[in-house]
Image (cartoon, helix red, strand yellow):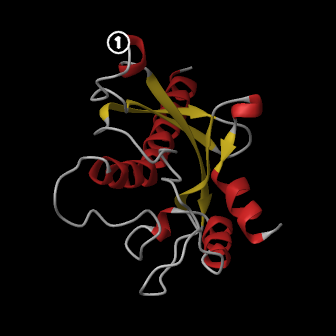
């Protein structure tokens, strides 16, 4: 009996470690988001720069590389971006992110759904208290590739308001 209790305890700990590992790429990307929206000087990087692109799945990396060929706007240096908005936080206007939490939850199959919650409109003076204190929620679908947790998609909203990073990239490249 003790043997079964020990095995069950070990499996629970192993499952928790996997869920904790799933937050690693999400934390890295949300650190970029937090820095980008902080309004402070310095170069916070980009979600898809060399330092962060490895946190995404091979599929997202491939789609992003193709999407770069279709910039949302022209730039002087020729380095376009396929998005004219923040593709993670989903916005062009906002405030420093406040109250960020990450909660791993089991998703279908071998994926883990890491839910990021934060307030992003707290500084908007013209908004009601309800709007300023609204909590945004992002679902990061984290899978394992080559033994490493990576983000396979970022989804927010439901129904007609649903936005998927993978679907947005496919739309940009015409898939």
Residue name at image x 48 percent, y 53 percent? 86
Q: How many marks?
A: 1
Residue name at image x 38 percent, y 14 percent? 128
Left or right relative to 109: residue 86: left
What residue does disc 1 label?
Answer: 129
The x and y percentages for residue 62 are: 66, 74
The x and y percentages for residue 144 are: 60, 57
Left or right relative to 135: residue 114: right
Toward the left, the furthest residue is: 41
Toward the bottom, the furthest residue is: 77
Residue 92 to residue 72: above or below: above
Left or right relative to 152: residue 80: left
Residue 152 to residue 42: above or below: above
Toward the right, the furthest residue is: 175
Q: Nearer the viewer, residue 97 or 95?
A: 95
Q: Nearer the viewer, residue 54 or 112?
A: 54
Q: Quadrant of the C terminus?
A: bottom right
Q: How many residues crowd around disc 1 within 10 Å: few (fewer than 14), some, or many (20 or more)?
A: few
The x and y percentages for residue 77 are: 42, 87
Residue 142 to residue 79: above or below: above
Residue name at image x 42 percent, y 18 percent? 131
Q: Nearer the viewer, residue 157 or 95?
A: 95
Residue name at image x 36 percent, y 18 percent? 133
Q: Does dot 1 land on a helix, a strand or a loop? A: helix
Place residue 106 in its image quadrant: top right
The x and y percentages for residue 164 are: 67, 47
């Amino acid at each position: 009996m003790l043997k079964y209790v020990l095995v069950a305890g070990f499996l629970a700990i192993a499952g928790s470690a996997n869920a904790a590992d799933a937050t690693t790429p999400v934390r890295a990307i949300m650190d970029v988001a937090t820095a980008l929206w902080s309004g402070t000087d310095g170069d916070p990087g980009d979600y898809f720069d060399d330092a962060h692109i490895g946190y995404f799945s091979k599929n997202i990396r491939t789609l992003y590389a193709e999407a770069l060929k279709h910039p949302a706007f022209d730039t002087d240096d020729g380095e376009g971006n396929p998005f004219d908005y923040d593709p993670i936080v989903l916005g062009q206007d906002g405030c420093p992110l406040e109250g960020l939490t990450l909660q791993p939850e089991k998703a279908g199959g071998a994926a883990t759904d890491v839910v990021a919650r934060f307030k992003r409109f707290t500084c908007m003076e013209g908004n009601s208290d309800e709007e300023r204190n609204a909590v945004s929620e992002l679902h990061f679908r984290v899978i394992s590739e080559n033994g490493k947790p990576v983000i396979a998609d970022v989804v927010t909203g439901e129904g007609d308001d649903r936005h998927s990073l993978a679907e947005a990239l496919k739309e940009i490249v015409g898939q």
